[in-house]
């Protein structure tokens, strides 16, 4: 069986992806693809891993988990999403480490499903907006305590990706930038579900509907109907063009307001991030989605 799991990062999803995925559950069930509701697996996997305490699971753990998660008959592919799988936002910088729980969580996932093909999906985000978004989700925690002494200039997603590869070396790993998600949304859904390029998928315009004016979205859908793109690249260019004209400013523009942060730091973090993304695209074994 293929275990497809979107595991993060925190602050890149807001559960929009899982809501679009489950819209395809009924249509895909007859094709051997199980897309369970998150309530079927998030708590179950978390508590199972916690109970293991770093130890090896019992031989029948995998079958017990799958029986509990899948309720729509036999399948050869199961699709799950939890952007907080690695840890909750409050623990991202715990003990002065950037995703210090990552290796343990990835190894646990490979141990829970040792007979299956793991297909991991992961989005990265500019630290200049990633850090403020996470801190906004953490209550009653001073900013310096939340950061755990971590200098945001040292944050490197490329190192996170390499640690995923080391902890799950046989897993397929797909990575994209959160900033590019609007152009990639349909391809992300198709990739997780296992559909070919340009095959219709439910929820393909869900994200655009949240960041584009209603008139713009209607014009975009009308344009696609009369000018169907032949490739994903063509479609991404169409999306970019319509977003340039019809995007809702409040939904696509982000203000950074953190203690001690200024425009110079935001600019520096952005430049470092762009350099880091170039490194990620070159990591062996990574399927990097580039719009």
Image (tube, grey):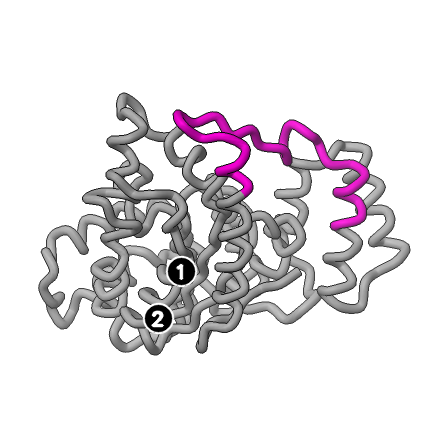
Tell me the CA gap for discs 2 and 1. 15 Å
Q: Is residue 56 left or right of residue 169?
A: left
Foreground residue among 239 and 93: 93
The residue under label 2 is 165
Number of numbered markers: 2
Identify the image quadrant of residue 290.
Answer: bottom right
Foreground residue among 118 and 86: 86
Foreground residue among 154 and 160: 154
- Residue 104 on image: x %, y %: 21, 60
Q: Residue furthest top?
A: 140
Q: Tell me the residue at 85%/53% (across/down).
A: 225
**Residue 73 in sight from this viewpoint:** no
Q: Tell me the residue at 37%/70% (across/down).
A: 118
Identify the image quadrant of the C terminus.
Answer: bottom right
Residue 260 is inside the magenta segment: yes
Q: Is residue 142 above or below residue 31?
A: above
The boundaries of the magenta stretch are 240-267
Identify the image quadrant of residue 233.
Answer: bottom right
- Residue 229 on image: x %, y %: 81, 63
Q: Is residue 246 left or right of residue 94?
A: right
Q: Tell me the residue at 9%/64% (across/down).
A: 55
Secondary structure beneath label 1: strand
């Amino acid at each position: 069986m293929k275990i497809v799991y979107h595991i993060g990062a925190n602050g890149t999803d807001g559960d929009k992806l899982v809501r679009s995925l489950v819209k395809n559950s009924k249509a895909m069930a007859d094709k051997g693809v199980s897309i369970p509701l998150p309530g079927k697996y998030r708590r179950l996997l978390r508590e199972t891993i916690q109970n293991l305490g770093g130890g090896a699971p019992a031989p029948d753990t995998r079958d017990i988990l799958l029986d509990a998660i899948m309720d729509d008959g036999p399948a050869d592919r199961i699709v799950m999403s939890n952007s907080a799988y690695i840890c909750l936002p409050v623990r991202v910088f715990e003990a002065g480490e950037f995703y210090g729980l990552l290796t343990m969580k990835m190894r646990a996932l490979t141990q829970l499903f040792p007979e299956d093909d793991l297909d991991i999906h992961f989005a990265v985000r500019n630290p200049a907006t990633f850090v403020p978004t996470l801190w906004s989700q953490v209550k009653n925690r001073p900013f310096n305590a939340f950061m755990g002494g971590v200098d945001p200039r040292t944050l490197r997603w490329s190192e996170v990706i390499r640690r995923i590869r080391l902890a799950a070396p046989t897993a397929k790993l797909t990575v994209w930038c959160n900033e590019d998600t609007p152009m990639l949304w349909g391809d992300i859904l198709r990739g997780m579900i296992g559909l070919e390029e340009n095959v219709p998928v439910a929820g393909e315009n869900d994200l655009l509907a949240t960041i584009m004016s209603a008139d713009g979205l209607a014009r975009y859908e009308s344009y696609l109907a009369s000018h169907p793109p032949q490739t994903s690249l063509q479609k991404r260019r169409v999306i970019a063009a319509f977003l340039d004209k019809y995007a809702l400013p409040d939904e696509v523009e982000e203000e950074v307001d953190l203690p001690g942060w200024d425009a110079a730091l935001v600019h520096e973090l952005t430049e470092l991030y762009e350099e880091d993304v170039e490194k990620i695209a070159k990591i062996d074994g990574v399927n990097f989605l580039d719009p």
